Image: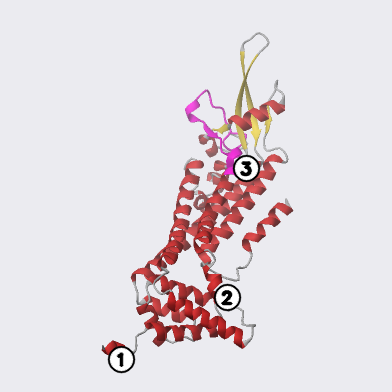
Amino acid sequence: MYKLLGSLKSYLKWQDIQTDNAVFRLHNSFTTVLLLTCSLIITATQYVGQPISCIVNGVPPHVVNTFCWIHSTFTMPDAFRRQVGREVAHPGVANDFGDEDAKKYYTYYQWVCFVLFFQAMACYTPKFLWNKFEGGLMRMIVMGLNITICTREEKEAKRDALLDYLIKHVKRHKMYAIRYWACEVLCFVNIVVQMYLMNRFFDGEFLSYGTNIMKLSDVPQEQRIDPMVYVFPRVTKCTFHKYGASGSLQKHDSLCILPLNIVNEKTYVFIWFWFWILLVLLIGLMIFRACIIFIPKFRPRLLNARNRMIPMEICRPLSRRLDIGDWWLIYMLGRNLDPVIYKDVMSEFAKQVEPSKHDRAK
């Protein structure tokens, strides 16, 4: 288990060249590692040990355990409101009196580890697509100028090559920016869709799962219904039918303990809180991107905030003369270049893109 979890640390390694922002990495790298870790832990708990243990007379225990694990177990929802030890033996466990419609079946637990794995793959998809679209462009034009330990001649040669690239490729980076922003939108869509599907997966209980847990502290002890026990019951019931010696049908009512749900309930508490935090961050990111695209006056301030050594007299002509794709490229360059080199490159680049007073007079 330690070796399996240790292999995930490569997803969290520091990037010397950054082509995305922190929220994008939280969605693609951290959330992927989180979901894969949860999947591995639940898989180990599920397949190493006893994920279900049923009590029944007249039938071999391993037969009932296998049957109930495959075909699901159930509880009686109204029994969660009854007093344990007096009215019911365990929360949700009561006589069904043959009322099939009143039963709440649980069929998800054998699928949780697989669902978490596919959720992790869905979270990694935007990063995979962006890496393909980006193609190492930022690393190519930075040329190691993010590390200032080099000779003056080498530094000047690389700086001139970078400036030459920017001048020759003006207005050729619009798709570069659009593809990255499309990947950010895909992150937002992915989280919304995942939360909706998880809510369907847990019969409409996921979206309010964390809220119900937080509200539990305000409810008197005798009136409490633990939402974790309701969504992930630890004790359930299962009905097993078999033929007797004379061919008559026999019904065996068993009580099943699900120790795996102890892990599941804690896992999804953390996932619930993290997904809501991530959703809020992504909504903020969408608003921020909309400001960049639709409010051009916002761009010079961002360039100046990226590197305070670049005055607004340089940021304004760069933002005015460049299209959105070129502006995004130089904005991301500020995250990867040495600040002094970045200032020199942007100062010279501004002179190249801003026409002289003589040209404007014509």
Look at the numbered disc 3 and give the secondary structure of its residue: helix
- Give left or right: position of 229 versus 322: right
Q: Say if 295 sits above or below 81 in the image.
A: below
Look at the numbered disc 2 and give the secondary structure of its residue: loop
Q: Say if 88 sits above or below 348 in the image.
A: above
The furthest residue to the left? 362
Using the rendered view, name the quadrant where residue 128 is placed.
Answer: bottom right
Name the amino acid type tagged 1.
His
Q: Give the Cα distance between marks 2 and 3.
A: 51 Å
Name the amino acid type tagged 3.
Asn
- Give left or right: position of 252 versus 187: right
Q: Give the Cα distance between marks 3 and 1.
A: 76 Å
Q: Earlier in the sequence, mark 2 or mark 3?
A: 2
Find residue 236 and report its horizontal and vertical position in percent.
60, 34
In this figure, which residue is indicated by the disc labeled 2? 143
Which residue is rendered at x = 35% and y = 79% of the image?
Answer: 321
Using the rendered view, name the quadrant where residue 143 is placed.
Answer: bottom right
Q: What crowding class fits label 2: few (fewer than 14 Cα within 10 Å), some (14-19), or many (20 or more)?
A: some
User: Closer to the camera: disc 2 or disc 3?
Assistant: 2
Q: Say if 67 sits above or below 362 in the image.
A: above
Q: Is residue 207 visible?
A: no
Q: Which of marks 2 and 1 is nearer the N terminus?
A: 2
In this figure, which residue is indicated by the disc labeled 1? 358
User: 193 and 223: which one is in front?
Assistant: 193
Q: Quadrant of the C terminus?
A: bottom left
The residue segment tinted magenta is 88-114
